[in-house]
Amino acid sequence: MKKLFGGAVLVLLLTFLLPGMVTEAADTRTIANGVYIGTVDVSGMTVSEASAAVEQRVEELRSRKLTLAAATDQSLTVTGSELGIAWANKGVVNEAYQLGHNGNIVQRYKVLKDLQNSSKVFDLNLSYDNEALTAILDRCSENFNQEKVNFLLTKTAEGFNITDGQAGCFVDTAESAGIIKNVIGSEWSQDAEHIQLSVKEDKPLGSHEELALVKDVLGTFTTSYKTSGSARSANVANGCSLINGTTVYPGEEFSVLEKITPFTEANGYFPAGSYLNGLVVESVGGGICQVSTTLYNAVLLAELEVTERHNHSMIVNYVSPSADAAIAESGGKNFKFINNTEHPIYIDGYTTPDKHITFTVYGVETRPSTHQVAYESEVLETIPASADEFRFDSSQGIGYVGTQSAHLGYKAQLWKIVRENGEVTEKTVVNSSTYKMVPKIVTVGTAGADENAMAQLNTAIATGDVGTVKAVAGAILAARNAAGTEGAEAANQAAADAVNAANALLAQQQAAAAAAQQAPAEDLESVNNG
């Protein structure tokens, strides 16, 4: 009987206690009449009821639409929830209850009497999601900003023409954020639905008067690409045309990559030879470095401020060492300079039918006529090519032997020499450059080669003689092609003879090397001196 009674008590206790464990007890304290939180009348409500009423109001604001306008026909509509609207001062409900409930009986009576004549309004403070606000203003900028068009120059046979500029506009995101925050913080509770964003005018650079002064040659340079094939020549001409006609204002930075990319056939480029990890490979836009190099030298003569320049990995033949400027989008190589003069400059570029490219920098010459500037390349070290390097290529058929010329390595520097009235007044190093040494690379095809053919090719390669490798590879291919025909026996004999010749040459080389190691030191010295 006692056990039954104890169980009943436990059930009753759980029935009354469990709800309180999972739900917060209602706050039944009652707020005085004449009290508002924002626009919500919480008169006579309990603290819990008032909290719920204000929460409901905040949810209404979260679903409310707000129009962000830049101009009459430019606006973006968002909701409070997109801005991350939330109730920021939830403690205000308790403050509302304290009104008329704090102090002695006289003070409480006075407050309640005052509320009968004049309501008390507590602020409803709202917060926002700063990241959401930033993202929305970025959308406004993307949709509403209008890019300015600067006054531009165009060179013709008769001289320069000037094209009028056009003002743009942009959303001032910092000021606009402040406006929106102010609405959220104070005016939102008054159901504000329209906000005028802060939009600023972006005035174009230049004027007719300023550009009319541009007529002096500050620097000009020409290089030749006569040995280039049709694809590389087309790339040089295309890159030149993309830069030609550019006006750069004082303080502006010019980026070659920005002007000439993307390197695609749609942008006028073709596959042509370019440097990659010591190899000459086909890539779309091959030859573009000659464009940047020619411009680099014109910029140096104009004495503009170079902010980025890189040398090639291997030496080039169209300018002296250290006078080049390599471009490699994937390798992070660019050529940039700043117009550090007080006037606009104009870049004129053109190519000729006899394959020459010229860049000329026009501006306003402020240097005295006695001022002369020149650049000289100094080679500090020459690194000779090492022994030929042989590589197998399984993508090429047996019999193929291709060669890439060796490149000497160099360490060089470029000197700037300034003369006033013919006397040297300044001599400074502009840059230091290091170019890789790359040996002659011989590529031997192995597609379809069996174990015996690979052994024969390895024997030929061991001689280090390109002629021998070509002879053996050609003989193996001829023997394969002749298989099953009347000439098969002769072809096989020719292949055997080629391999025997390779073995004989290898034996001679090994004997000579052994003899050299055993020779007296004085004999070696006389040989070396001879």
Image (cartoon, rainbow, N blue to C red):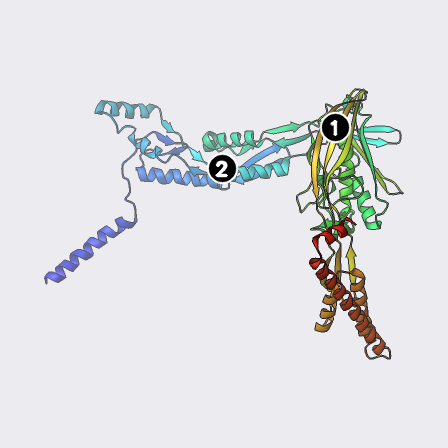
Tally of numbered tags: 2
- For residue 263, the mark is none
Closer-to-camera residue (130/251) = 251
Which kind of residue does numbered mark 2 sit on?
Answer: Asn
- Residue 219 appears in which quarter of the rendering? top right
Which kind of residue does numbered mark 1 sit on?
Answer: Glu
- Residue 308 appears in which quarter of the rendering? top right
Please name the residue shown 31% across and 37% down the image.
47
Label 1: few (<14), some (14–19) or many (≥20) C-alpha neighbours in 10 Å: some
Q: Residue furthest left?
A: 1
- Judge left or right: residue 511 versus residue 79: right
Residue 401 appears anywhere in the view:
yes
Query: Where is residue 213 shown, x and y percent of the image?
Result: 80, 22
Locate the N terminus and report the quarter of the image it occupies.
bottom left
Which numbered disc flags the more N-terminal residue, 1 or 2? 2
Residue 279 appears anywhere in the view:
no
- Residue annotated with mark 1: 303
Q: Secondary structure at mark 2?
A: helix
- Residue annotated with mark 2: 130
Please name the residue shown 81% across and 22% down the image.
422
In the depicted structure, whether residue 103 falls above or below residue 268: above
Task: Measure the alpha-carbon separation of dots 1 and 2.
Answer: 46 Å
Query: Where is residue 314 shown, x and y percent of the image?
Result: 73, 46
